[in-house]
Amino acid sequence: MAKALSQDLRDRVVSAIDGGLSRRGAAARFGVSVSSAVRWHQLAREHGRAVARKPGGDQRSSKTDVHVEQIMAMLEEQGDITLAELQAGLADRGISVGIGTLWRFFNRHAITRKKRPDTRSSKTVLTC
């Protein structure tokens, strides 16, 4: 994972843009990407200073955790629902989430869904 660039560099880029240099010009002058210069200038305008955010972390969990009651209700209604069916059901209710987001939701909450029926125990080998 890349390390955040220094606060001093961020401040110098923002100061150069505020001083009249274009965002592309400031990016070329200080050797940073144009998107970084644009983002830093926008952060400085909105928050007063372009401070680096905490790196990493799950950015999507709050999207599904807000709708936990609806997800659990759909699971209760149809016990053998697939992730794709769950995604479609949520989309019908105006909630747009990806299958991967739903999978992380179930993994985070330790909810497992077995799709195959229970099999009888083997007499020779331990089955799970």
Image (cartoon, rainbow, N blue to C red):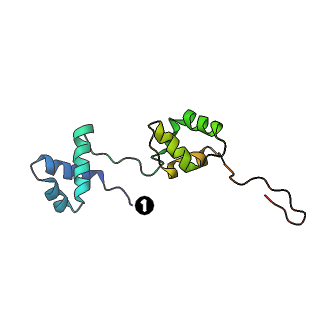
Residue sitting farthest toward the bottom = 124
Of 70 and 54, nearer the camera is 70
In percent of the image, x 80 and y 56: which residue is there? 119
The number of numbered discs placed on residues in the rendered structure image is: 1
Name the residue rendered at 42%, 61% in the picture: 1
Q: In the rendered view, would you say 35 is above or below 65?
A: below
Q: Residue at x 84, y 62 (%)?
A: 126
Asked whether residue 94 is in view, the answer is yes
Q: Residue 49 location, x and y as percent?
A: 26, 42
Is residue 101 left or right of 125 when viewed as pictured?
Answer: left
Q: Nearer the viewer, residue 105 or 73?
A: 73
* Residue 63 seen in render: no
Residue furthest out toward the left? 20
- Packing grade of label 1 (10 A; few <14, some 14-19, many >=20) is few
Find residue 19 and report its horizontal and vertical position in percent.
10, 48
Does dot 1 land on a helix, a strand or a loop? loop
Q: Which residue is mark 1?
A: 1
Looking at the image, residue 66 sits to the left or right of residue 17; the answer is right
Q: Amino acid at mark 1?
A: Met
Residue 73, position as x, y percentages in the image: 60, 34
Residue lying at the far right of the rendered structure:
123
The image position of residue 128, as x and y in percent, is 78, 58
Q: Is residue 73 left or right of residue 125?
A: left
The residue at 37%/47% (across/down) is 53
In the visual, does 89 lie left or right of 111? left
Picture quadrant of residue 35 = bottom left
